[in-house]
Amino acid sequence: MQVITSIQEMQKTSLEIKRTGATIGCVPTMGFFHRGHLSLMEGSRAENDFTVVSLFVNPTQFGENEDFDEYPRDLERDKDLAEKAGVDILFVPAPGEMYPENFSTFVNVYGLTDEMCGASRPGHFRGVTTVVSKLFNIILPNRAYFGQKDAQQALVVQRMVEDLNFPVEIRVMPIIREDDGLAMSSRNTYLSKREREAALVIPKSLEAGRALLEQGEKRAALVAEKISAVIKREPLACIDYLVVKDAVTLKDIEEIKGRVLVAVAVWIGKTRLIDNFIFESPQRRT
């Protein structure tokens, strides 16, 4: 596996690969790899000739008083895991390489970023879309891989790619969970033993909401109430947001129909965790 730290070298290498007619898959990450990240790498390897994984803890997507300094980092461990996963190139730029002095250009996607994580973390998605657009221009991928756990992020990136005509296919891969159901996240390492147990209320609440939908419940408000009731039974849990929305537009809905996103952000102690599922409402026969 090749490790590249320079934008110029990464672009040159990608151009050389593209000239041969080979395809490049890109997996943008902030490191501290877990099985969720590895599943994205495996997806890329299966569909492309070369897989490039970027490892960059992006400062512009962290707000004031967020966990940028505390975000878990272990470069040597990540190198080892990426190499074992069959990654061809690990791109590890420094902050000063990505954001040199006098950097003043940002990418904004409007509408999709107004609610959910966008409302809770002002400026977050501006940082995401800016760094992802830079990575696409540096790595020149044919396909890029994102996890369904960050459902809003995936939709925002898809919108950016469509609006700005990036020649990149966005592939959204399934959520990877721990054996007990908790969605894998680098931030799970923040949790104490008691908080880790409390965090299980998140997947349990979503399972309760899904069960209602599978039983035929059509009222979005009742599904949200059920999920909320389950979460509120856990003293260490505090809901940041809980939404039932159209899975494409992120517009609020009253009636369950078509493709629906059910998503939560929950504070467990001082750690904010997100999770979601997509429900496809059966088409009514006429």
Image: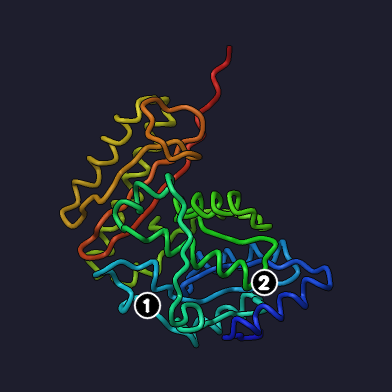
Residue 174 in percent (x, y) is at 53, 53
Q: Quadrant of residue 256?
A: top left
Three-letter code for the amino acid on which mark 2 is drawn: Thr
| Left or right: 88 as drawn, with respect to 257 | right
- Which residue in the rendered view is the most extreme toward the left? 235
Three-letter code for the amino acid on which mark 1 is drawn: Pro
The structure residue drawn at horizontal position 56% and vertical position 51%, both measured from the top left corner, is: 158
The Cα–Cα distance between marks 1 and 2, rounded to whole angstroms, is: 23 Å
The structure residue drawn at horizontal position 35% and vertical position 60%, both measured from the top left corner, is: 123
The structure residue drawn at horizontal position 37% and vertical position 77%, both measured from the top left corner, is: 72
> Is residue 240 at least partly visible in the picture?
yes
Determine which residue is flagged by label 2: 51
Residue 285 in percent (x, y) is at 57, 15
Give the crowd class for mark 1: few <14, some 14-19, many >=20 residues within 10 Å.
Answer: some
Residue 37 in percent (x, y) is at 52, 67
> Is residue 32 at least partly visible in the picture?
no
In the displayed structure, would residue 40 be above or below residue 12? Answer: above
**174 and 27: which is toward the camera:** 27
Of labels 1 and 2, earlier in sequence is 2
Q: How many marks?
A: 2
Question: Circle 2 sits in a helix, a strand or a loop, which is it?
Answer: strand
Image disc number at residue 89: none
The structure residue drawn at horizontal position 35% and vertical position 25%, both measured from the top left corner, is: 219
- Which residue in the rendered view is the most extreme toward the top? 286
Determine which residue is flagged by label 1: 72
